[in-house]
Image: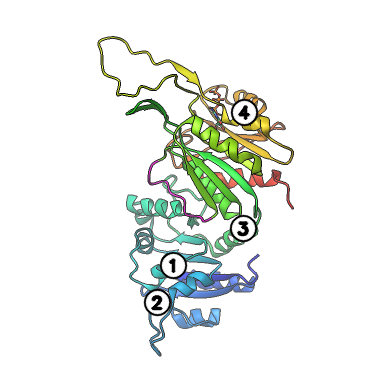
Amino acid sequence: MLQGKKIVLGITGSIAAYKSCLIIRQLIKKGAEVQVVITPAGKEFITPITLSALTSKPVISEFFSQRDGTWHSHVDLGLWADAMLIAPATASTIGKMANGVADNMLITTYLSMKAPVFIAPAMDLDMYAHPSTQQNLKTLQSYGNHIIEPGTGFLASKLEGKGRMEEPENIVAVLEKFFSQQESMKGKKILITAGPTYEKIDPVRFIGNYSSGKMGFALANECAQRGAQVELVCGPVSSSMQVHHPNIHRIDVESAQEMYEACKERYPSMDSAILCAAVADYAPETRADQKIKRTGDDLVIRLKPNPDIAASLGQIKKEGQTLVGFALETNDEESNAQAKLKKKNFDFIVLNSLKDKGAGFQTDTNKITIITAEGKKDYPLKSKVEVAKDIVDELSALIPKP
Ligand code: CTP
């Protein structure tokens, strides 16, 4: 999987820098080409001579070569690489990456990078647990970067034992898995719905819900990273929710009716749809043209049912197409989910229970059960990015391969 892959390895000023040698050795043994970019602080921990001997390439650390003044092009490196790995990544480098502070060659290379980026943090627990470090890691993750940590890839929860850099063989295994999956959905077309819908009452008020869109965006990123073309139909989400992958085409809608139209038009040409949006089941029967004024009387808003996007796609689903739904339940979770699986003609349904702490709306984590006609699989609490991988693994197994 790593044969012929070009890896830019960024090394920063942490005691774990000595482990970079082990990473390089394993990458090279597996056939990869490694170009080291090291920060000035990194050189205090490990010498460029060791690194260049291992990689058979001069180590880059300054904007200009000290020997002959040749300019090192971070733009060329960004185009050359199949992946960038920053291991170890200190709190300082993580902060600079998240905020675009391009004061060394490693950060400029990162900002020019066209390939996927993997970050293995290394620091003491207090620095790691600080809200600023956690926020920076979340920011980097939202840009589609992969954070490699010991254990399950948690951010912000279960901090014990965190901060220490993941072991070299596990870091290399993450890269191998990534490359083996990179093409697994190549050419497949996936429709994803995400976020809430807003149903207008008058020009300034609406009926909505707490969905953030995070789960749907994580799914869109995961499918895109595996080579799929994604149509992401999203309801009104916060402006901080952005997609950066070129394989994702985002369509913004507001109401359930608009989301329905966008999906109905697209689904016939798709291989699959994942319906992650929290669609309002009802909308006001009439929308007031002017702001509704307060009166002394009770106010009654009559609601009419919205189209059920999932059920209508389930009806037009053809042989070879798949359809995945979500169910957020508060009681009788599994039997309700089983009923929805049948009613909406889903291939599988992803169940979240509001009884589980850390699952559902507005959180960065989720705890799911995947329910098929044959049975169920329970998963532990994970970040939504990791949950997306589990869901897409399940989906990939169902999509016919060429
Ligand atoms: N869904 C949809 N269109 C709707 C309502 C729901 O596409 N109008 C989809 C959701 O995106 C989700 C699944 O259907 O994938 C289940 O949503 P949920 O709201 O739990 O189901 P409902 O059919 O609304 O069932 P109930 O309100 O009875 O729980």
Residue at horizontal 63 percent and vertical 67 percent from the top? 2
Q: Which residue is mark 1?
A: 112
Q: Which residue is mark 3?
A: 182
**Sequence-earlier tag: 4 or 2:** 2
Q: Amino acid at mark 3?
A: Gln
Whether residue 366 is visible, yes or no, is: yes
**x and y percentages locating residue 379 in the rendered image:** 58, 39
Real-space Cα separation, disc 3 to disc 1, in angstroms: 21 Å
Real-space Cα separation, disc 4 to disc 2, in angstroms: 59 Å
Q: Amino acid at mark 4?
A: Ala
- Seen in the picture, residue 359 relative to 333 is either above or below; the reply is below
Q: Amino acid at mark 2?
A: Lys
**Sequence-earlier tag: 4 or 1:** 1
**Sequence-earlier tag: 1 or 2:** 2
Q: Is the residue marked 1 within 8 Å of ligand 1, measured from its CB? A: no
Q: Is the residue marked 3 within 8 Å of ligand 1, measured from its CB? A: no
Q: Which residue is mark 4?
A: 311
Q: Is the residue marked 2 within 8 Å of ligand 1, measured from its CB? A: no
Q: Which residues are magenta?
A: 238-246
- For this orientation, the residue located farthest to the bottom is 68
Q: Amino acid at mark 1?
A: Ser
- Position of the N terminus, as image quadrant, is bottom right
Q: Which residue is mark 2?
A: 43
Real-space Cα separation, disc 1 to disc 2, in angstroms: 22 Å
Q: Is the residue marked 4 within 8 Å of ligand 1, measured from its CB? A: yes
